[in-house]
Image (cartoon, grey):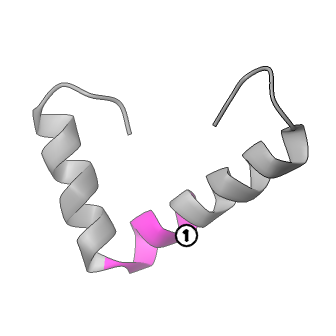
Amino acid sequence: LNRGGNRDANRALHMICVVRMGSDERTRRYVARRSAEGKSK
């Protein structure tokens, strides 16, 4: 995601991530690990 980039592309990537965080176990583990490291989602 890039604040200065293509808004449609950013939105598409954001929606993919949101859906995967809700439904994919690998993504949930990745997000949990990154959060434990103090990183943002």
* Furthest residue toward top: 4
Corner quadrant of residue 27: bottom left
**Magenta span:** 18-24
Q: Which x, y percent locates residue 13?
A: 66, 55
Tell whether 19 sits left or right of 8: left
Tell which of 19 and 3 is nearer to you: 3
Q: Which residue is mark 1?
A: 19
Magenta segment, prevailing SS (helix, strand or loop): helix
x%, y% of residue 38?
18, 25
Between 1 and 36, the one nearer to me in the picture: 1
Q: Is residue 38 above or below residue 27?
A: above
Quarter of image, res 24: bottom left
Mark 1, other Cα within 10 Å: few <14 / some 14–19 / many ≥20 = few
Tell me the amino acid under the disc marked 1: Val
Q: Is residue 20 left or right of residue 2?
A: left
Q: Is residue 9 magenta?
A: no
Q: Position of residue 11 (x, y in %)?
A: 77, 49
How many numbered discs, if any? 1
Q: Position of residue 5 (x, y in %)?
A: 81, 29
Identify the residue at the far front of this view.
5
Query: What is the quadrant of the C terminus in the image?
Result: top left
Query: Is 9 displayed left or right of 38 in the figure?
Result: right
Is label 1 in a helix, a strand or a loop? helix
Q: Look at the image and tell me in which quarter the N terminus lies.
A: top right
